[in-house]
Image (tube, grey):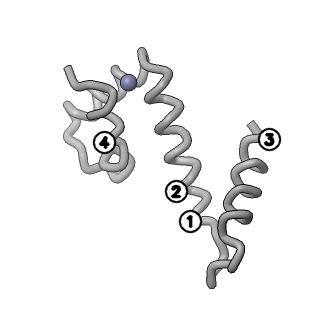
Amino acid sequence: MLSCKQYVARSSDHMDRQLSVRERLQMRHHLLFCPNCRRFIRQMRLMSATLKALPEPLPTNLDATVERMLSEQSRQR
Ligand SMILES: [Zn+2]
């Protein structure tokens, strides 16, 4: 079994669909029982979706923009 730390380290690979089917199943199984990793990966996904949704060119007040987008998204949930 992998530790939480190892799952978290793989979480970006997971998002990129780089893992084998077996690894993906292990990850899903772990996430089922581990709220900590679940929360972390949800935040990672939210963050990368937010970054993709940012306008080009990037606004100068990037931190404030990302923060506002994240708070808007979490309100919708
Ligand atoms: Zn975990």
Q: Residue at x 75, y 48 (%)?
A: 71
Q: Tell me which label, 1 or 3, sits earlier in the chain.
A: 1
* Residue ID at (34%, 53%): 16
The answer to whether marks 2 and 1 mark residues whose Cβ atoms lie closer than 8 Å is yes
What's under tag 2, amino acid-wise?
Ser
Q: Position of residue 55 (x, y in %)?
A: 66, 76
Q: Position of residue 27 (x, y in %)?
A: 31, 29
* First reached walking from the N terminus: tag 1 or tag 4: 4
Q: Quadrant of the rendered structure where residue 26 is? A: top left
Give the structural element (helix, strand or loop) at label 2. Answer: helix
Q: Tell me the distance, in whole angstroms, between the alpha carbons under discs 1 and 3.
A: 19 Å
Residue closest to the eye, 77 or 6: 6
Mark 4 belongs to which amino acid? Ala
Identify the residue position indicated by label 3 in the image: 75
Label 1, on which residue?
A: 52
Residue 6: give x, y in percent of width and height: 26, 34
Kind of residue indicated by mark 3: Arg
Q: Marks 3 and 1: in contact by CB < 8 Å?
A: no
Q: Residues within 10 Å of mark 3 (few under 14, many from 20)?
A: few
Q: Which mark is residue 48?
A: 2
Q: Please identify, in this view, whether the residue under mark 1 or under mark 4 is nearer the observer.
A: 4
- The answer for how far apart the CA atoms under marks 4 and 2 are is 15 Å
Q: CA distance from mark 1 to mark 4?
A: 21 Å
Q: Which label sits in the foreground, 4 or 3?
A: 4
**Closer to viewer: mark 4 or mark 2:** 4
Residue pointed to by mark 4: 9
